[in-house]
Image (cartoon, rainbow, N blue to C red):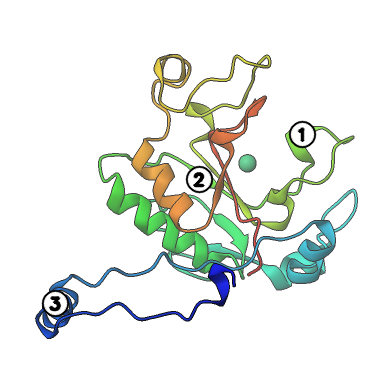
Amino acid sequence: MSDDDQMWVPPRRSLLAWLRDLGGRLAAPRVDPPEPHPAKLTGLRERVQFYGDPGRGAVDKAWQRSNIITCRDKNGDRPTMPGVPAQWYFEIHRLVEPHARRAFAAARDAAPEYEIERAASFVFRHQRHDPRRPLSLHSWGIAIDVDAALNAAHTSKPGEYPEPWGPAWVERWPRGLPQGFVEAFEAAGWTWGGRWREYCDPMHFSWDRRP
Ligand SMILES: [Zn+2]
């Protein structure tokens, strides 16, 4: 007879231990589980399935009219994004707008000292502005760049990747996004380009998920 065949016997516990256990559970603070996020997109096919086809070579104006919205208190479809200066026409995919709004609000709470100068999402273009590359997620309005001028992308040699917020990082991006700001976006489900190795893009956040 193997161990597996032996009958399981519940451990004996005194009433006192049980009560102590119950009391501890009742007194323990309630911890919310991490917020569940929509599933990651598996690729281009799903991206088009959920967010539509923004066009080839040039933007499909009909797609843009029915999917891209402007977040601006004045002359906008929705209010300005939290923390984003009101003068910018912040254009984004309508299905991703709530995720962006949550992330910007959380980032402002996490890093209240950081003042965004400029943020943008929708622009029809290829990855890294190279027409040989596929369309960028910005073409769908499902990626955001924050303060591009202060967080310029950088290509490193293998093994020479700067560690986020390490000495080499701070030297390269002295006024880059603070850790709290970035982590708030990540906790809200966004993927940060600052964790990419060879091609590091610290201004960039992708919503590479279903709506
Ligand atoms: Zn970007």
Quarter the N terminus occupies: bottom right
Q: Which residue is mark 3?
A: 17
Of the numbered discs in the image, which one, if any, rests on residue 129?
1
Location of mark 2 (residue): 119
Disc 3 or 1, which lies upstream in sequence? 3
Real-space Cα separation, disc 3 to disc 1, in angstroms: 66 Å
Q: Amino acid at mark 3?
A: Ala
Q: Is residue 52 above or below residue 123?
A: below
Q: The disc labelled 1 sits on which kind of residue? A: His
| Element assignment for label 1 | helix
Q: Taking the image as drawn, is residue 131 in sight? A: yes
Q: Quadrant of residue 91?
A: bottom right
Q: Nearer the viewer, residue 124 or 143?
A: 143
User: Is residue 76 in view from this perspective?
Assistant: no
Please tell me how crowded label 1 is: few (under 14), some (14-19), or many (20+) other residues with Cα within 10 Å: few
Disc 3 crowd rating (10 Å Cα; few below 14, some 14-19, many 20+) is: few
Q: Is residue 119 above or below residue 201?
A: below
